[in-house]
Amino acid sequence: MEEFPVDPAGKWLVIVNPNAGVKKGAKEWPGILEIIEREGISHHHLLTEHKDHAIHLTRKGIEKGFRNLVVVGGDGTLNEVLNGVFLQQACPISEITLGMIPVGTGNDWCRMFNVPFDFEGAVQLLTKKRTFVQDIGKVTYHKKDKTLERYFMNVAGMAYDALVAKKTNLVKEKGHGGPLTYFWFIFASLFQYKFLDAVIEVDGKSVFKGEVFSMNVGICKYNGGGMMQLPFAVPDDGLLDVTLIKKAPKWVVIRHTKKLYNGTLVDLPFIKTFLGKAIRIRSSSKIYLETDGESLGHTPLTFEILPKALRVVTGELAFPSSLLLP
């Protein structure tokens, strides 16, 4: 049962996922808490108990007066807190600041914003008050005849990417796996995968019609534990980056796996990239979706960009930006 302090003014609400990183969150939390207290950070912490619990805790915390939020978890927990921020109606989004202490298996959002993977460094960022206002993505998708929406702050994946994420999540839900699980399923899922047809529109213009292997739409560069599938992404340019891997022999995909991690994948002839504010994807068969590593529903899909929508705590940035506050 969650309890909130009477006066949250100035305090950080720390939302901890003990199951993040295959229960790494539970193991490391006592040490992280010790660092937070040693740094003199005024805070109140809550532990999640089930999937999507962080959405509820975030909404409730903001309603109680918290404006500074910290996630102790992975990209999935970060995504839940993000959705809690955007679903609440207690205050404007501009009043919220979101930070992260990474204990997940991928931590791809942290790679983009140079948030240290060591806990001491990540906690100290909260005291330095360096922030960045990033774009946020919103996707409308379908699941069991329902039309649903989800916000994301990193990368959404479809087709093969979503299949690999789903298999990885099933293993993690059983308390197994680790940082290399996603990498393993990149290969292990290849021979059961069937190419899917898709029609892709960018800002109302048809840009592709044909069979696809995988697709990514995102705000930031990294997903899948360090893969750079959107190497040109700038998180405050007001545009969604799209990388499409067209139908290609599966042995070719295996051969070029290294290029997934160094950003040179986009140089291959069967890769197409696009930029736009609105992306629509349709298909005759279901193409499945994941956002920030969380498995969701399927096509038809509509993506839109919310420019400079959320203030986040960052490390030293290594990309061009239009709003970097000291």
Image (cartoon, grey):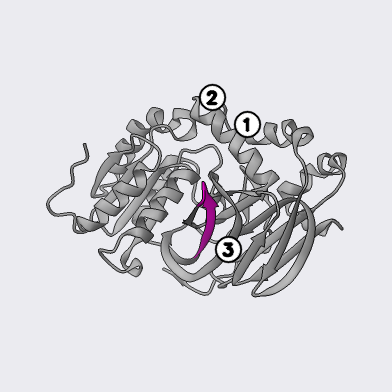
State the residue position of label 3. 302
Q: Nearer the viewer, residue 300 or 312?
A: 300
Task: Identify which amino acid the numbered label 2 is placed on.
Answer: His
Task: Identify which amino acid the numbered label 3 is placed on.
Answer: Thr
Q: Nearer the viewer, residue 277 or 286?
A: 286
Q: Would you say the residues marked 2 and 1 are in contact, meaning their CB atoms lie under 8 Å apart? A: yes
Quick check: is 139 in the magenta stretch? yes
Front label number (3 vs 1): 3
Which contiguous range is marked in magenta?
A: 136-145
Disc 3 versus disc 1: distance between alpha carbons?
29 Å
Image: 63 above or below 5: below
Quick check: is 149 in the magenta stretch? no
Residue sitting at the far left: 6
Residue at image position (59%, 59%) is: 301
The numbered mark, 2 or 1, whose residue comes first in the sequence reads: 2
Disc 2 versus disc 3: distance between alpha carbons?
33 Å
Residue 39 pos. (x, y %): 30, 46
Q: Which mark is residue 176?
A: 2
Residue 90 shows up from this direction = yes
Q: Main secondary structure of the magenta part?
A: strand
Task: Identify which amino acid the numbered label 1 is placed on.
Answer: Thr
Residue 27 pos. (x, y %): 40, 27
State the residue position of label 1. 181
Image: 259 above or below 231: above
Q: Would you say the residues marked 3 and 1 are in contact, meaning their CB atoms lie under 8 Å apart? A: no
- Element type at marker 1? helix
Residue at image position (23%, 53%) is: 11
Residue count near mark 3 (Cα–Cα under 10 Å), binned few <14, some 14–19, many ≥20: some
Residue 128 shows up from this direction = no
